[in-house]
């Protein structure tokens, strides 16, 4: 009952500290992008912050310690980031794909699009976990 009360009054415990990422301080990249909604496929302009392998988005560009992201994508779970003008038939469009879904974004210019693709791509490489020899299972050798 106490947790229901905290939720109803807005006094929820901070269960997600975004893995300690201080998104308000010295981000790797920030800027406005138009993002397609996850459930209702409308396009909304959001302020994006890329930092330490996480892509956060906000309604406003004035991001502070007290700001709460509208969403976050762990970039390490992404497989590809690439242009998507042909798919969406929209200029400056790009996509970010995981194993299970593809998210679409639209930048304000070709340069912004390329800069976001490069920044996110670099972050994917830096934060994705490589498979080590000890994690490889050879099913043929276990007969």
Image (spheres, helix red, strand yellow):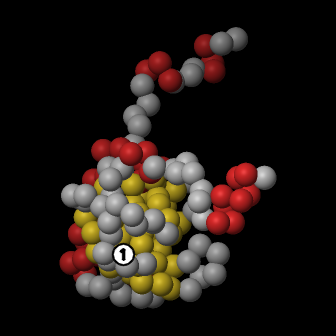
In this rendering, is residue 143 above or below 102? above
**Residue density around tag 1, few if under 14, some if 14–19, many if 20 or more, within 10 Å:** many
Task: Give percent across and percent down for residue 95.
Answer: 44, 70
Q: Work out whether residue 89 or residue 1 is closer to the camera in this orientation and state it.
A: 1
Q: Is residue 86 visible?
A: no
The answer to whether residue 75 is above or below residue 40 is above
Q: Out of 139 and 127, give the one closest to the viewer.
A: 127
Q: Number of marks in the image?
A: 1
- In terms of secondary structure, where does tag 1 sit? strand
Q: Is residue 57 visible?
A: yes
Q: Which residue is mark 1?
A: 47
Above or below: residue 37 compared with residue 73: below
Which residue is at the front of the view, 67 or 119?
A: 67
Identify the image quadrant of residue 58: bottom left
Point out residue 33 in the picture as x, y percentages from the top left corner: 36, 78
Q: Position of residue 130 (x, y in %)?
A: 40, 34
Q: Residue at the location (59% across, 82% down)?
A: 41
Q: Is residue 6 left or right of residue 103?
A: right
Name the residue rendered at 30%, 61% in the picture: 24
Q: Residue at x 42, y 88 (%)?
A: 90
User: Which residue is found at the position 64% from the left and 75% from the top?
Assistant: 39
Where is residue 116, by image quadrant?
bottom left
Quadrant hosting residue 121 = bottom left
Please state, as top left, top right, bottom left or bottom right, where the C terminus lies in the image: top right
Q: Is residue 84 above or below residue 131?
A: below
Task: Provide residue 40's location: percent of width, then percent of height.
Answer: 63, 81
Viewer-proximal residue among 9 and 26: 9
């Amino acid at each position: 009952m106490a947790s229901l009360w905290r939720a109803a009054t807005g006094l929820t415990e901070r269960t997600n500290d975004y893995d300690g990422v201080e998104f308000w301080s010295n981000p790797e990249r920030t800027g406005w992008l138009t993002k397609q909604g996850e459930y209702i496929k409308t396009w909304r302009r959001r302020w994006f912050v890329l930092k330490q392998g996480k892509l956060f988005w906000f309604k406003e560009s004035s991001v502070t310690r007290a700001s709460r992201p509208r969403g976050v994508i762990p970039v390490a779970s992404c497989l590809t980031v690439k242009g998507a003008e042909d798919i969406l038939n929209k200029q400056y469009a790009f996509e970010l794909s995981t194993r299970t879904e593809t998210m679409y974004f639209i930048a304000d210019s070709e340069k912004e699009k390329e800069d976001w693709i490069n920044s996110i791509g670099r972050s994917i490489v830096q934060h994705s976990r490589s498979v080590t020899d000890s994690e490889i299972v050879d099913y043929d050798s276990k007969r």
